């Protein structure tokens, strides 16, 4: 009888241990998922900043460089949190910057200025939507 009692206590302790282990695994996975999402959201603003810096290094027009610097400052002080409602704005911003980068040789300063201003406007709209909580 004592042996049966000993085995049932061991089985009970093992069961408790397994439950705690499973809970720990689930909690760690959720924390990792949240960290990955936060990193992806920060990556967007970092991409804007880095692409603008790259364009500044390739261009000589002072007006265009000033607009790129303003875009960098706008991205620097933008909320890092993102949502599905602003994904389109974010994709358009990166698309515009990629387009400027591809056409850097043949693009005229006026065309670049308008695309950069468009990026700034899109970023402002994105930030406004995030602040409104949409």
Image: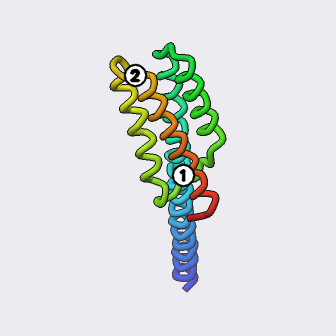
Residue nearest the observer in this picture, 39 or 80: 80
**What secondary structure is marked by label 2?**
loop
Residue positioned 33% across, 19% down in the render: 106
**What secondary structure is marked by label 1?**
helix
Q: At which x and y percent is residue 114?
A: 46, 34
| Marks 1 & 2, CB-CB < 8 Å contact | no
Tell me if residue 26 comes above or below residue 62 in the rendering.
below
Q: Residue furthest right?
A: 77
Residue positioned 64% across, 58% down in the render: 131
Q: Which residue is mark 1?
A: 126
Residue positioned 35% across, 17% down in the render: 105
Which quadrant would the N terminus be assigned to in this image? Answer: bottom right
Mark 1 and mark 2: span between their CA atoms?
27 Å
Q: At which x and y percent is residue 99?
A: 36, 32
The crowding category of the residue bearing disc 1, from other C-alpha atoms within 10 Å (few below 14, some 14 to 19, many at least 20), is many
Splitting the image into 4 quarters, where does residue 120 fall? top right
Residue nearest the observer in this picture, 80 or 122: 122
Q: Please give the count of numbered marks on the rendered protein.
A: 2
Which quadrant would the C terminus be assigned to in this image? Answer: bottom right
Tell me if residue 85 comes above or below residue 36 in the rendering.
below
Tell me if residue 50 comes above or below residue 75 in the rendering.
above
Q: Return the mark for residue 108.
A: 2
Residue positioned 58% across, 47% down in the render: 124
């Amino acid at each position: 009888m004592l042996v049966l009692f000993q085995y049932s206590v061991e089985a009970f302790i093992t069961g408790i241990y397994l439950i705690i282990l499973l809970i720990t695994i689930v909690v760690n996975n959720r924390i990792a998922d949240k960290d990955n999402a936060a990193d992806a959201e920060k990556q967007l603003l970092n991409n804007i900043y880095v692409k603008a810096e790259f364009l500044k290094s390739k261009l000589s027009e002072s007006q265009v460089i000033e607009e790129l610097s303003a875009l960098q400052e706008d991205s620097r002080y933008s909320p890092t949190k993102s949502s599905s409602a602003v994904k389109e704005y974010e994709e358009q911003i990166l698309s515009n910057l990629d387009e400027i980068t591809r056409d850097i040789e043949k693009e005229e300063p006026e065309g670049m200025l308008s695309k950069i201003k468009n990026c700034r406007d899109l970023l402002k709209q994105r930030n406004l939507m995030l602040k409104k909580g949409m």
